[in-house]
Structures are given as C-alpha cells and as structure tokens.
Amino acid sequence: MPSTTVRLDAPLDMHLHLRDGEMLNNIAKESAQTFSGAVVMPNLVPPVSSKAEIVAYRERIMKAIGEESFIPYMTLFFKPEYDRVFLESLREDLTSIKLYPAGITTNSEGGVSGFDVEELRPTLEAMSDLNIPLCIHGETNGFVMDREAQFVPIYEKLATAFPKLKIIMEHITTKESVEALERFDNLYATITLHHLLITLDDVAGGMLQPHLFCKPIAKRPEDREALLNIALKAHPKVMFGSDSAPHPKHAKEACGCAAGVFTAPIALQVLTELFETHNSLDNLQAFISGNARQVYGITPLKKQVILEKKPFTVPADYKGVVPMYAGERLAYSIREVKHG
C-alpha cells in the first residue's frame, strides 16, 4: 500500500523566535527550510524598537538562512511613546507590533507596566489607522496558572476601546481566551504546537521535563481541549504560531531553567499527524497558512511542503538545542520541498 502523502502550500509560522548571533545562525534554517515565512519576535537584547534595528535584524536573518526561500515578517517591540509620524516612517518595514507586559517573559523588561487606555491611546489609534496589528503576550503577574485568564479583561478593554485595531492574542493556552475570541470581532489568536499536545502534568507531573517548560505555562486538560477544538476546526480567527523558542541545552537543563520549547524542525510533521488522528487533515491548510493570509493580508512566497507517512526519528539536538520529542519517532517525514 503506498505511503500517505500530505501537501501543504506556503506554511506560515505566525510567532517565531530566531534569537540573534550564534543562535540565529544555528537555528534559522530549521524554519526557513519548510516555512514560507514567519512573524519574528523582537525581544532581543536590546529589543528591536527602531527602523534601523528592524532593517539590520532582517539583514542578519537573511544572511543566516542563506539560499532558503523565506520571508521574515518583522515586528517592533511596543513602546507607548511611538507616535504617528514614527509609525508611518516604518510602515513598509514591519508586519506588526508586539506588546509585552514588563518582565513577564524572556527579555521583556522594557515592556508595558500598566494598561491605561488613555496612556496607550495615541499609539494604538495610530496603529489602528495605519492597519498595523497589535500582538500581545497576554499574562499578568498573578499566580502562574491564572495569569492568562486574568489578562482576558485587558484584552476586552483594548478591543472595546480600539474596535478597528486587529489584536492578536499570542500563544493562547486557556479556554477563557478561546471564549473571548467569539465576543469581539477584532480579537484573533495564535496557537502553538506544544499547547495542543501537553498539559502542566506533562511538564511537572512526574520528573520535571525542562524542554517542555515554557511561558505561558501549559495548563489543564480542559484548556488543551478548548485549543484543540478550535484549531482542528481551523476557526478563521486562529493561526498557527509555533512560539518555537530555542535555548542552549545548558540553559534548559539547569537551575533557573529558561522558558521555551523548540519545535521549528518538527512542527509540520507533528501537526500533520495530530490533524490526521482527529480526522481533520482537510483543515490543516487553513490553520497553517490560509487564516494567517486573511488576518494579516499577506501573500507568502510560493513553497509546497510534501510530507509522507514514513517514520522520522527526531535528532537528539540541533547544534546544541534540544527539540521537543528529541529521540522519539514521528509518523510523518518531510519528503520534499518545492519552490515557485
């Protein structure tokens, strides 16, 4: 019996960490080989917060990926002092602006400390008028399992105050975030691979699994089911965003374990198996690309990824970065990538 094949057109990763320096050079190709493009996060040290920094970071990414066909969709680190003139000057250079609550995740110390609508109004109204989406890491500083649910009222406040502003709830992990999508026309969301698969029990229910530790932390089974339900249906307001976040092995397997799950090299294979298992393969194309094109209004590079049902053993590491499912066998392999 011939192997099952699945063809994905122009896969997009709408939330990706490529880091910088040696790490960028080591791992950027793992996304560029199979994805047509990705929304690249700006939380470097220092964060990407000017036109010159956007241009320079894009150039470093393009150098790191070599001959691969890939568009880095650039983002700016949100600051409330951005004015309309500044945003107009770089509109052609960025895809979105990323807002981090101060200190909530990796390299976010310069983020927003409060969410006073009037303080944020000049920047957010300019973004709305210029059709620049706002991506938000939505967590408070409360109890770790409640942080995202506690942030939902802030999403609601912003969605109400700026009804024409596209607001992307990044890497959602809770049923409360899923429910919020239906209440506001201008709320959208990205969902990661790992949050479709794991709960907190997988991270810390037995021996601690550092390579599954991430922020937002994985939640309860009912939260995972809510995410699965909306992703498998490819609801038009949700998109795949890996939040693939590489850290060197020594930073993960240590006290003070760094937060992030590295999934870039295995995302398409595992998503294909997951959607097939749930009899939803017909919806994978929309989740992995179609919805993002509509939400962001982008036209990705032509690239077709052909997967086949042939076992693939995940390498133990990729140049010192341990991936999710390291050493395990996956049902699908990438057979070929076609360009143009």
Image (cartoon, rainbow, N blue to C red):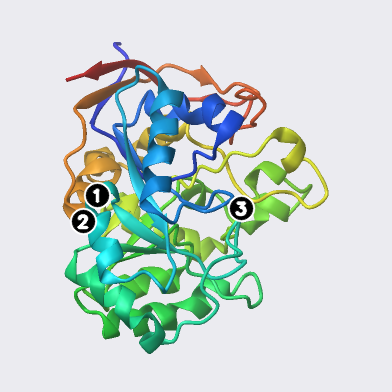
Q: Given the image, on which type of amino acid does mark 1 rest?
A: Ala
Residue lying at the far top in this picture: please name it.
Answer: 1
Whole-Å distance between the Cαs marked 2 and 1? 5 Å
* Mark 1 in CB contact with mark 3 (< 8 angstroms): no
**Circle 1: is it few (<14), some (14-19), or many (20+) Cα within 10 Å?**
many
- Looking at the rendered image, the quarter that the N terminus falls into is top left
The image position of residue 199, as x and y in percent, is: 59, 56
Q: Residue at x 64, y 31 (%)?
A: 321
Tag of residue 214: 3
Q: Label 1, secondary structure: give it.
A: helix
The image shows residue 218, relative to residue 71, as above or below, that is: below
Q: Label 2, secondary structure: give it.
A: helix
Q: Quadrant of residue 155?
A: bottom left
Tag of residue 295: 2
Asked if one can make out residue 191 in the rendered structure from this viewpoint, the answer is yes
The image position of residue 38, as x and y in percent, is: 35, 40
**Circle 2: is it few (<14), some (14-19), or many (20+) Cα within 10 Å?**
some
Q: Nearer the viewer, residue 262 or 163?
A: 163
Q: Given the image, on which type of amino acid does mark 2 rest?
A: Val
Q: Quadrant of residue 279?
A: top left
Q: Nearer the viewer, residue 172 or 161?
A: 161
Q: Label 3, secondary structure: give it.
A: loop
* Mark 2 in CB contact with mark 1 (< 8 angstroms): yes
The image shows residue 30, relative to residue 137, as above or below, that is: above
Q: Residue at x 28, y 85 (%)?
A: 161
Tag of residue 171: none
Whole-Å distance between the Cαs marked 2 and 3? 26 Å
Horizontally, residue 112 falls left or right of residue 91, namely right
Q: Residue at x 34, y 61 (%)?
A: 189
Q: Which residue was labeled with disc 1?
A: 292
Q: Given the image, on which type of amino acid does mark 3 rest?
A: Cys
